[in-house]
Amino acid sequence: MAGEPKAKVIPLHKNSSRAAAQRRSAARAEGARRRHPSVLSDPPGGASSEQIAAVIHEIDEHRGVVAGAAATSEQTPNELAKHIAAVAEFIRKRMTGDYPVDEFGFDSHLNNAIFLPLLRVFFKSWFRVEVSGIENLPISGAALVVANHAGVLPFDGLMASVAVHDHHPTHRDLRLLAADLVFDLPVLGHAARKAGHTMACTGDAHRLLAAGELTAVFPEGYKGLGKHFKDRYKLQRFGRGGFVSAALRAKAPIVPCSIVGSEEIYPMIADVKLLARLLGLPYFPITPFFPLAGPAGMVPLPSKWHIQFGEPIETAGYDESAAEDPMVTFELTDHVRETIQQTLYQLLANRRNTFFG
């Protein structure tokens, strides 16, 4: 009708779906807020805020330890890097000549880097050498080590040098007095000089001892090195006592050294003297494996070794004329020989097996 106001129509379903969605979303948010442990003071059946804080602190500490270990491992070079650096340093010194060589040709840099590591393979893994009495060697200054000699090839001297270098508190070098034949060989003689060894003559012995070197001599010589297997551990004659005269002149102590195990590396059952003369050798050995097995017969048997250094025999109390007195030199020579022989018998009595000790 005219003049009547129009009625206001209120839609009952205006945006009803949107409003319902908003209400559901608000309800979920409120429920999540109420269930979150960080806003609960003491939720039933859940973790407290203190417990959660403790767990977070533990995780942070663990991450710190792992990160520190990773940083340490990054700072510490691995073994390969160390070896590469050592090889590079060795090459640099060899090329620049930055290494000492003494009057005898001893090259300690080459000896420590090449010769000793090669000999340690035999010392530790093949002969499994045990060492005792190393405290009887002086910390510094001259001394004459006198040892028995055997085994067809002079492995005993080489093993004694490794024993002294590796077991002595100051890692001293043992300077061997070797036979002239060693230095007549083209390659071996040069290597022996580089390793610190020299000829077994009175002059070189005096010079080494006067320089305060730890010197080793094998008075049996070829008689001990090339004796038959049936005569093993029976010391041969000790020559004319020249080593005693050298020690008396230098006032150096004499240290007896007994080596067990060297006699069995090449059991010598015969000596072909005719072949030895033709080849210019002191002996031509026949062993159970050489020469029948060819080059394989040159491999030493893995006997168990023991090297014992005895108590030093002092020479400082003798006067200067004692070095020229044959009675004094003979008495000291016989005393050293008997000491080594008796020690060999004791070591053999305690050895249960040739190859296992």
Image (cartoon, helix red, strand yellow):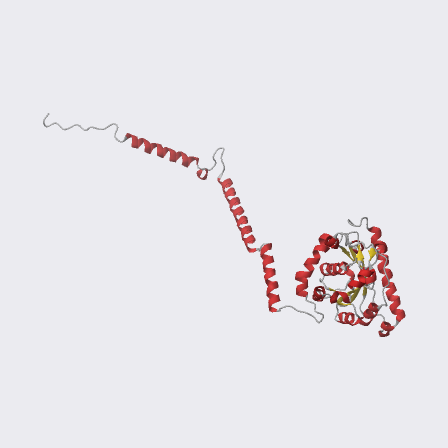
| 30 lies left or right of 176 | left
* Among the 4 quarters of the image, the one containing residue 285: bottom right
Q: Nearer the viewer, residue 11 or 140?
A: 140
The spot of residue 176 in percent (x, y) is 76, 65
Return the residue found at the far right: 327
Return the residue found at the far bottom: 321
What residue is drawn where x is 33% and y is 32%? 23
What residue is drawn where x is 85% and y is 67%? 241
* Among the 4 quarters of the image, the one containing residue 320: bottom right
What residue is drawn where x is 80% and y is 71%? 202
The answer to whether residue 146 is visible is no
Q: How many marks?
A: 0
Q: Nearer the viewer, residue 93 or 34?
A: 93
Q: Is residue 17 above or below residue 77?
A: above
Return the residue found at the far top: 1
Q: Nearer the viewer, residue 300 or 131?
A: 300
* Among the 4 quarters of the image, the one containing residue 257: bottom right
The answer to whether residue 294 is visible is yes
| 318 lies left or right of 172 | right
What residue is drawn where x is 70% and y is 55%? 121
The spot of residue 274 in percent (x, y) is 82, 61
| 224 lies left or right of 69 | right
Q: Is residue 216 above or below residue 43?
A: below
| 1 lies left or right of 313 | left
The spot of residue 10 in percent (x, y) is 22, 28
* Rendered-image quadrant of the N terminus: top left
